Image (cartoon, rainbow, N blue to C red):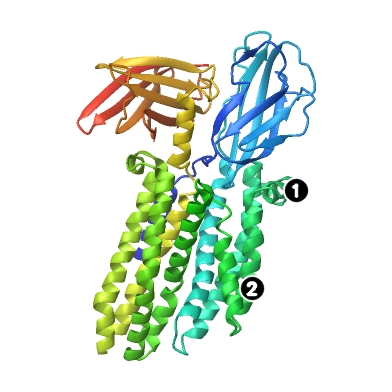
């Protein structure tokens, strides 16, 4: 592989990740809090409740006074469905209190936040804290890179096992295939352990030393990461042993355990309906593993085998790949439908855009596979002088693009899927989400209006929600929306943010640059259609 191709692959890999290291978006979302944020109560509640859109595991759930001390003599946390309850054993005096929490979602992403409520009086100004809603950015890149290694190693090991079990290889190629599978299995076993370390550090939002801390490993053991590792590590070790033997059942068992380890964690395998999502992910992995692991043995076959033998192997692989690639495509469409829900979300959400990158790379791989089957395999069968070299070169390039597909697939674990965003938007529209004491105002333009909500409207990172309506007050689905923020008093020039759609009428933004108190100027641009643009302007006071 020449240097130009290496740099191209590196650039595309960075593009899949997003070049920088963004905060990890949480995949479980808070649907309801009781008491709600900014709510005034007449008496001490018996318990506090946080309700999410999926099952979560609590890392901590505390009630603090304004001095930051834990109060309320809390009892043992109780889980009931998607809700977490914190019983209180003490009557609290009148005043303002802060709820702070951090939980881990079913797909191993941490979710955290805080808000205030009051007893016997109004909530004191400035008491509530900004909801974090994301993991410590320190662990985003290590977690992502580990996932690429784990995905690639698992596919290599499971795919090598499948190739040995369902195909007949030349005697000179089979040892290399077994060696490839053994290396992939051993790397996968190590990657499972590393996923526990970085995942636990991510959950507790620890510093560099958190990798070896008891708190991080305890948090990882309480998540689906431990379940996945408990299945995957034995499967990888069994497969590594079986590649040096001729018995088929250890290979089948190792293959099944490796694939199964990916069905108990991750947002694709935990999305509702779980049976459909898990089945689709499993089929997607089986087809992908067969395809991913075949490149090296096919290259070796093209290089060292006689033309008739090489053509036989290519035909045998193609006849099986047709069915397995069909499984990849159909199951991939099912998983995408579960997560994206609407074609509009492909362009308007971060998750959808990353999915489009992956789909585009898959199309490239399919095109190359078709070229290999229709043009290069017949030339190989005819015994052309350069046929073997041409086939090997084409397969090497195809394998490089397939590695990018794996990187793009791993990047889909970073943003919140539109499925979860839609559930949160529905809860917000229904009034179930906690209110905030941040900024809320409605701006108008050309007969349309936009409700602007900025939380917490304080220095630091702020969440901005835009809800668009027409002249009759009906929700309007904008094609895209962006915000340009500036602070003229401090000579801070425009900072542009592109929104993430939350159908039917909302757009979501995270703006970390509001670090200076003052009257920030917000300029909202929204497109009703490609040629119909609306401009809204207003001032948001940030304290």
- Where disc 2 sits, the SS reads helix
The reply, left or right, for residue 487 in relation to residue 120 is: left
- Which quadrant, please, contains the N terminus? bottom left
- Res. 363 image quadrant: bottom left
The reply, left or right, for residue 45 in relation to residue 488 is: right
Give how far across and how far down residue 112 sits, in percent: 60, 34
74 or 153, which lies in front? 74
- Where disc 1 sits, the SS reads helix
Which mark is first along the chain, 1 or 2?
1
Would you place residue 52 above or below residue 470 in this image?
A: below
The residue labelled by disc 2 is 238
The reply, left or right, for residue 169 in relation to residue 449 is: right
Neighbour tally class for label 2: few under 14, some 14-19, many 20 plus, Cα within 10 Å: many
Q: Residue at x 61, y 55 (%)?
A: 195
Residue most toward the top?
121
Would you place residue 257 above or below residue 91 in this image?
A: below
Would you place residue 259 above or below residue 116 in this image?
A: below
Number of numbered discs on residues = 2
Residue 518 visible, this orientation: no
- Res. 85 image quadrant: top right
Q: Nearer the viewer, mark 2 or mark 1?
A: 2
The residue labelled by disc 1 is 214
Residue 531 visible, this orientation: yes
Neighbour tally class for label 1: few under 14, some 14-19, many 20 plus, Cα within 10 Å: few
518 or 133, which lies in front? 133
Give how far across and how far down residue 427 sits, in percent: 49, 28
Give how far across and how far down residue 6 sits, in percent: 39, 64
Spatial CA distance of label 2 from label 1 is 29 Å
Give how far across and how far down residue 142 sits, in percent: 56, 52
The reply, left or right, for residue 361 in relation to residue 238 is: left
Q: Are marks 2 and 1 in contact (CB under 8 Å)?
A: no
């Amino acid at each position: 592989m020449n240097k130009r191709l290496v740099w191209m692959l590196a650039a595309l890999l960075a593009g899949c990740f997003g070049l920088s290291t963004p905060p990890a978006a949480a995949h479980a979302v808070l649907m309801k809090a009781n008491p709600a944020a900014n709510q005034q109560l007449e008496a001490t509640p018996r318990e506090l409740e946080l309700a999410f859109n999926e099952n979560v595991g609590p890392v901590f759930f505390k009630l603090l006074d304004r001095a930051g001390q834990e109060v309320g003599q809390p009892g043992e946390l109780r889980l009931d469905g998607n809700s977490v309850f914190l019983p209180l054993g003490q009557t609290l005096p009148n005043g303002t209190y802060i709820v702070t929490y951090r939980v881990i979602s079913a797909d191993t992403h941490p979710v955290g936040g805080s808000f205030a409520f009051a007893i016997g009086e109004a909530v004191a100004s400035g008491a509530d804290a900004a909801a974090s809603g994301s993991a410590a950015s320190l662990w985003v890149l290590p977690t992502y890179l580990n996932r690429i290694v784990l995905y690639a190693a698992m596919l290599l090991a499971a795919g090598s096992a499948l190739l040995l079990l369902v195909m007949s290889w030349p005697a000179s190629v089979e040892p290399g295939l077994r060696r490839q599978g053994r290396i992939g299995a051993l790397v996968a076993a190590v990657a499972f352990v590393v996923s526990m370390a970085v995942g636990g550090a991510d959950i507790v939002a620890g510093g560099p030393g958190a990798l070896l801390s008891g708190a991080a490993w305890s948090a990882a053991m309480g998540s689906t990461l431990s379940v996945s590792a408990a299945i995957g590590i034995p499967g990888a070790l069994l497969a590594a042993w079986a590649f040096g033997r001729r018995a088929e059942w250890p290979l089948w068992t190792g293959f099944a355990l490796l694939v199964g380890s990916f069905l108990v964690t991750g947002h694709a395998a935990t999305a509702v309906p779980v049976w459909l999502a898990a089945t689709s992910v499993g089929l997607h992995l089986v087809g992908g593993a067969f395809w991913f692991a075949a490149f090296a043995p096919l290259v070796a076959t093209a290089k060292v085998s006689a033309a008739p033998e090489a053509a036989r192997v290519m035909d045998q692989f193609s006849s099986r790949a047709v069915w397995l690639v069909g499984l990849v495509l159909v199951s991939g469409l099912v998983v995408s439908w579960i997560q994206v829900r609407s074609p509009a979300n492909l362009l308007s959400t971060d998750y959808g855009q990353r999915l489009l990158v992956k789909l585009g790379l898959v199309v490239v791989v399919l095109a190359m596979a078709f070229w290999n089957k229709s043009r290069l395999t017949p030339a190989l069968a005819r015994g052309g002088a350069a046929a073997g070299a041409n086939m090997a070169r084409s397969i090497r390039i195809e394998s490089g693009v397939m590695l990018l597909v794996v990187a793009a697939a791993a990047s889909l674990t970073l943003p919140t899927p539109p499925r979860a965003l839609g559930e949160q938007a529905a809860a917000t529209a229904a009034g179930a989400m906690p209110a905030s004491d941040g900024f809320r105002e409605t701006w108008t333009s050309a007969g349309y209006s936009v409700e602007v909500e900025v939380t917490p409207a304080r220095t630091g990172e702020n969440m901005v929600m835009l809800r668009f309506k027409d002249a009759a007050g009906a929700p309007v689905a904008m094609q895209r929306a962006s915000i340009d923020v500036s602070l003229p008093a401090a000579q801070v020039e425009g900072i542009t943010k592109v929104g993430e759609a939350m159908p039917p009428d909302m757009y979501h933004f995270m703006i970390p640059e509001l670090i200076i108190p003052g009257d920030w100027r917000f300029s909202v641009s929204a497109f009703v259609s490609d040629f119909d643009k609306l401009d809204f302007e207003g001032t948001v006071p940030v304290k």
